[in-house]
């Protein structure tokens, strides 16, 4: 039996169902090989050759696939149709010992029986241009990440990371925040008139001041506003130009990755990672009991193309004619140009089977999967429909040197809006209600003229959607990277959400500033976008990936060396370990001496005067030293690293006893962590090491026997997060009984 290898187990189940047991289908679970986790894994001196290793969690997978490959008549590698998928196929081919010139690779844009069968008829060799483009990206990202992250950890604080695209995205967020902070509101006034024809045959309508002396009106103060109102009161309103037309609105393009993320954010407030996770399920297949197993709903989700196949286009036109009528089918099929720089390797995101309407699956999909599927379905149908048409009317109303504007439009043919309502911001002067169709020169009565003071608004912080849009427009990152970049920024706490917007944290400013100081090219948007273009050149076979990395690395390494040594000062102090001169450096905790023989000798000596406290170490008895960390001063054992004991810093006070230790029955002590958070530990420490973030009651949970604790609100609950036991505090029970 032939073997088909895909990445995802869900994808394997869907394909296996469609092929009805004619093929053995198994999954690799993504990459089986990668660069090693704890070392650089790149031989810089050997033309930047990467050293790939089988991931520890994939050893059993590789063993299983190797056994299946031995028994298979033919082997097909059916990973995703992009660079990443091509690289996974290459790794599988290499590890399984397949012929590098063999016809093993198949690809399809959708997981359907027809698409898979068609792909099996046209196997090809692995596309090494795509593999090389992925290798170049991986090597560049590893070099930048593995070199810059330690630099940040040494200069700022532990636990930080930098990335070739991630750090540029963070800069966009920080720069926007600084624009907001530096923004100075400007005053302006709007003037609105409520008007009606003097014979009162038409309904009243509102018009807004647009021009003064044939130039854009700009009223910046109350004095100017009052002067305008006074002049208007003395003058007469008359209809000037009248422009009536039929306005047409073309259907929006079907979704690509970035626009799907933006639409899901706007309509449902879904984050980019959340949207992609749900879309991935719809692409790979969801277990539908009524349909006998896994069913795939949409085509491949990582794409920057708006192109659709002729077959899908014809099916959409037939569906539209049947549901909405022939008038809703455009005379010629709709085509959409992809943006400049798009790889255009795949179709746009669309439903696989138009007969599987959102209404027909609403009861079998959960809310999120239904929402995304309906969004994709409706947008694709709309993209192939006729234009919407509006009756548009624009009036110019003249009063002396002042010109007012009133506009409106009314729908006369729904077109694509029957299937999909696009979220476009309208002109504030345009309403969906038409002003009366008046003739030029008609005198108007004023029912009231008023002015309103306003102020300009600062630029908005980024949302997931607007950041994706900005990255796409600037050409940084690719469809497959947007969601992961946003995920890292949130996970690392470089940003925090404020009413749905991204607000950079304090460390984000520090990271951006230090990287901007030493690595201006890495942080430059144009440089990053240009790097994406060069990766595309490798994809198309026009450039060797080693050359790209070799051009990038030497200048980067030189900047890194300067950044790491900027401010260093060679001293007369000799290293007590090897005798070489010590170098005075500045780190996140201040100045220190480091051996100039590094990395052969890594000896360092603190230049900070060590302040000794009168508090003995609870573990070894030595008097604790006063240290300074990111949360301020704390006590640390001088015998570090042999003894790693630490205590909060401060005047010694009487121990506050609160609660009872459930382990030994001794009183519990209220303590404070280095970060200032209150917790409770047994007074019998170190013999008894019980601790809890809530007050221990001394009792055990009747369900799981873990410690019962009392929260700040007085509720008694189980300390085991997986146990749901909870009871009111005894004091509250007593109050209710009385």
Image (spheres, rainbow, N blue to C red):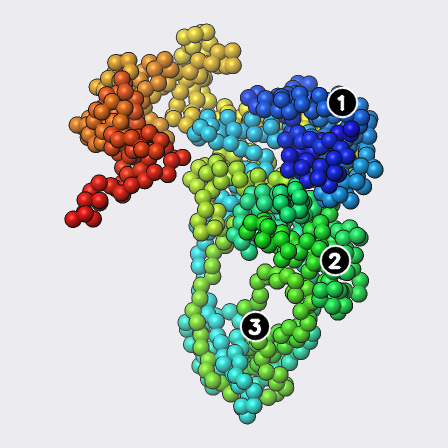
Residue 248 x %, y %: 69, 69
| Disc 3: CA contacts within 10 A as few (<14), some (14-19) or many (>=20) | some
> In the figure, 170 relative to 240: above or below?
above
Q: Secondary structure at mark 2?
A: helix
Closest to the observer, 669 or 371: 371
The residue at 62%/24% (across/down) is 58
Q: Residue 621, how many percent across, how many down?
A: 25, 13
Q: Position of residue 178 (x, y in %)?
A: 47, 47
Circle 3 sits in a helix, a strand or a loop, which is it?
strand
Q: Is residue 411 above or below residue 285?
A: below
**Residue 451 in the image: above or below residue 363:** below
Q: Position of residue 241 (x, y in %)?
A: 63, 81
Q: Which residue is mark 1?
A: 71
Give the residue pinned by disc 3: 431
Work out which residue is located at the far bottom of the displayed protein and give it: 199
User: Residue drawn at (47%, 84%), measured in percent from left and top?
Assistant: 447
Nearer to us in this view, 298 or 415: 298
Q: Which mark is residue 316?
A: 2
């Amino acid at each position: 039996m032939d073997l088909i290898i895909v990445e995802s187990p869900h994808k394997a189940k869907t394909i296996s169902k469609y092929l009805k047991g004619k093929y053995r289908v198994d999954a690799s679970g993504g990459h089986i090989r990668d660069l090693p986790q704890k070392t650089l894994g790149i031989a810089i001196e050997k033309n930047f050759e990467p050293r790939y290793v089988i991931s520890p969690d994939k050893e059993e997978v590789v063993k299983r696939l190797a056994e299946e490959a031995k028994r298979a008549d033919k082997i097909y590698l059916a990973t995703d149709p992009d660079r990443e998928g091509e690289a996974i196929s290459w790794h599988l081919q290499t590890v399984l010992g397949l012929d590098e010139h063999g016809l093993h690779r198949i690809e399809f844009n959708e997981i359907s029986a027809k698409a898979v069968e068609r792909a099996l008829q046209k196997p090809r060799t692995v596309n090494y241009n795509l593999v090389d483009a992925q290798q170049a990206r991986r090597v560049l990202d590893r070099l930048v990440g593995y070199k810059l992250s330690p630099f940040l950890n040494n200069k700022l604080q532990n636990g930080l990371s930098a990335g070739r695209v991630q750090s540029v995205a963070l800069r966009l967020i920080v720069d926007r925040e600084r624009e907001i902070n530096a923004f100075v509101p400007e005053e302006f006034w709007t003037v609105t008139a409520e008007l009606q024809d003097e014979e009162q045959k038409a309904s009243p309508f509102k018009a807004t001041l647009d021009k003064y002396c044939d130039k854009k009106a700009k009223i910046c103060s109350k004095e100017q506003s009052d002067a305008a109102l006074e002049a208007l009161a003395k003058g007469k309103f008359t209809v000037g130009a009248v422009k009536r037309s039929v306005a047409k609105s073309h259907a929006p393009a079907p979704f690509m990755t970035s626009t799907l993320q933006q639409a899901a954010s706007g309509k449902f407030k879904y984050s980019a990672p959340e949207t992609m996770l749900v879309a991935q399920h719809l692409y790979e297949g969801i277990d539908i009991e009524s349909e006998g197993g896994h069913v795939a709903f949409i085509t491949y989700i990582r794409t920057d193309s708006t192109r659709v196949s002729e077959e899908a286009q014809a099916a959409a036109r037939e569906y539209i004619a049947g549901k909405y009528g022939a008038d809703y089918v455009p005379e010629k099929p709709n085509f959409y140009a992809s943006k400049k720089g798009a790889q255009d390797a795949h179709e746009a995101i669309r439903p696989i089977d138009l007969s599987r309407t959102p209404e027909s699956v609403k009861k079998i999909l959960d809310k999120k999967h239904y929402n995304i599927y309906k969004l994709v379905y409706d947008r694709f149908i709309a993209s192939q429909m006729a234009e919407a048409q509006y009756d548009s009317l624009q009036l110019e109303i003249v009063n002396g040197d002042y010109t007012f504007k009133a506009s409106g439009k009314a729908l006369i043919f729904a077109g694509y809006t029957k299937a999909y309502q696009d979220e476009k911001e309208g002109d504030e002067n345009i309403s969906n209600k038409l002003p009366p169709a008046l003739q030029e020169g008609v005198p108007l009565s004023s029912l009231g003229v008023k002015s309103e003071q306003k102020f300009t608004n600062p630029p908005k912080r980024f949302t997931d959607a607007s950041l994706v849009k900005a990255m796409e427009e600037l050409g940084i990152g690719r469809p497959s990277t947007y969601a992961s970049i946003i995920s890292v920024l949130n996970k690392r706490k470089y940003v925090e959400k404020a009413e749905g917007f991204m607000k950079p944290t304090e460390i984000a400013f520090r990271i951006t500033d230090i990287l901007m100081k030493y690595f201006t090219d890495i942080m430059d948007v144009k440089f990053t976008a240009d790097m994406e273009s060069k990766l595309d050149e490798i994809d198309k076979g026009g450039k060797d990936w080693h050359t790209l990395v070799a051009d990038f690395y030497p200048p980067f390494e030189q900047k890194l060396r300067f950044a790491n040594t900027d401010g260093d000062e060679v001293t007369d102090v000799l290293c007590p370990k090897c005798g070489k001169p010590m170098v005075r450096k500045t780190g996140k905790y201040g100045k220190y001496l480091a051996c100039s023989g590094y990395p052969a000798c890594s000896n360092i000596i603190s230049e900070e005067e060590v302040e000794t406290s009168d508090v003995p170490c609870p573990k070894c008895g030595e008097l604790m030293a006063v240290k300074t960390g990111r949360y301020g001063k704390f006590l640390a054992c001088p015998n570090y690293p042999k003894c790693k004991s630490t205590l909060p810093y401060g005047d010694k006070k009487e121990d506050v006893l609160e609660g009872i230790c459930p382990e030994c029955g001794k009183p519990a002590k209220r303590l404070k962590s280095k970060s200032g958070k209150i917790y409770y530990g047994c007074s019998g420490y170190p013999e008894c090491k019980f601790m809890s973030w809530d007050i221990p009651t001394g009792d055990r949970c009747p369900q799981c026997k873990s410690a019962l604790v009392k929260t700040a609100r007085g509720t008694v609950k189980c300390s085991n997060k997986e146990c749901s036991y909870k009871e009111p505090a005894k004091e509250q029970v007593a109050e209710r009984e009385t």
